[in-house]
Amino acid sequence: MILELDCGNSFIKWRVIGADGLGRVGAGIVDSDARLFADLAALPNPRIDRCRLVSVRSDAETAQLIDELRATYDVKVDCVQSARQVGSVRNGYEDYQRLGLDRWLAVLGAYHLGQRACLVLDLGTAVTADWISSDGVHLGGFICPGLPLMRDQLSTHTRRIRYDMQAAVAALQELEPGRTTAQAVERGCLLMLRGFVAAQFAEAQARFPEGFEVFLTGGDAELVRDVVPGAQVVPDLVFVGLAIACPLN
C-alpha cells in the first residue's frame, strides 16, 4: 500500500491507497506526528510499502517525520521538491522555489483534471487563488486570510470579541445581519471570503473567454460552492498533484 501525506503548518492530511494507486484503504486529518502513527497503526492491515509526501513544515520537522516513517515501516519516503516544470505545466513564480508546494501540487492536479484554463481556489487557514492558462502556464495567484485567520485576528486585536466555536458554527447557518457578536463577526468574515471568490470568478470569466474550469479545495470549500456555478470540489486535489510530481516507479 501507498501512504500519502500532506504536511501543513497545523495539520497533517493522510491517506493510504492501493499499490496500483487506486482504492482508498484509510484517510484522516491529524494535528501531530504521534496521532498520525496511532491512526495508521489502527488500520486493519497497516502494511505500508511506499510513501510520498509534501511538506510546508521546516526542514528539521520534515526530516524528523521522514526518519520516523523509515524506522516504523522500513520504506522509501519520497518528498516532493520545487520544480520549474512538470509535464506541460510550468511554474509561474519569478523564483519557482518560492511557490508553496501545496499550491504547486494543486495547480498540477487541477490542470491534469481540467485539461484547459483553470482557476484553483484553496480555502483553508489561508485562502489561495491560482491561475493556469489553457496551455499549462501557471500565471500566478493571490493569498489572503481565510476564515480562521480573520476570526483569530479580530479576537486578538479587539478585546470584546469573545465567543466559542459552537457559537461560530451556529452563526453561519444564515447570512442575515448579525444580532450577536458571534453572528456579526462570522457572517462578516464569510461575506468577505465569498466576495473574494466571486471576484476571482468574475476575473476568470473575463480572462478566459473560451472557457475554464474552477476547482475548490480546502476545509471551507463548501461555504463558497454556490458562489461559483459549475465549480468542482476536490478535497484531495493536492494528492492528485502529488501523484503527478512524485510517481512511484
Image (cartoon, rainbow, N blue to C red):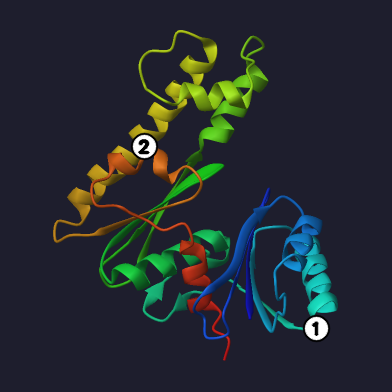
Q: Amino acid at mark 1?
A: Asp
Residue 247 in the image: above or below residue 16:
below
For this orientation, the residue located farthest to the bottom is 249
Which is nearer the eye, 136 or 22? 22
Quadrant, the C terminus: bottom right
The answer to whether one can see residue 99 in this image is no
Mark 2: give few (<14), some (14-19) or many (20+) Cα within 10 Å. some
Q: Amino acid at mark 2?
A: Phe
Quadrant, the N terminus: bottom right
Q: Is residue 20 left or right of residue 223?
A: right
Residue labelled with disc 2: 196
The answer to whether one can see residue 103 in this image is yes
Tell us which disc is closer to us: 1 or 2: 1
Label 1 residue SS: loop
Residue 39 coordinates in the image, percent (x, y): 73, 61
Going 49% across and 74% down the picture, which residue do you hit? 84
Going 56% across and 63% down the picture, which residue do you hit? 101
Q: Is residue 203 left or right of residue 72?
A: left
Instruction: Identify the disc placed on residue 207.
Output: none
Residue 186 in the image: above or below residue 217:
above
Residue 23 in the image: above or below residue 151:
below
Of the two numbered discs 1 and 2 on the same chain, state the one appearing first in sequence: 1
Instruction: Identify the disc placed on residue 74.
Output: 1
Residue 223 coordinates in the image, percent (x, y): 40, 38
Mark 1: give few (<14), some (14-19) or many (20+) Cα within 10 Å. few
Which is nearer the eye, 59 or 23? 23
User: What's the CA distance linking mark 1 and mark 2?
Assistant: 45 Å
Going 83% across and 75% down the picture, which residue do you hit? 72
For this orientation, the residue located farthest to the front is 44
Going 38% across and 13% down the picture, which residue do you hit? 177
Q: Quadrant of residue 110?
A: bottom left
Residue 46 in the image: above or below residue 142:
below
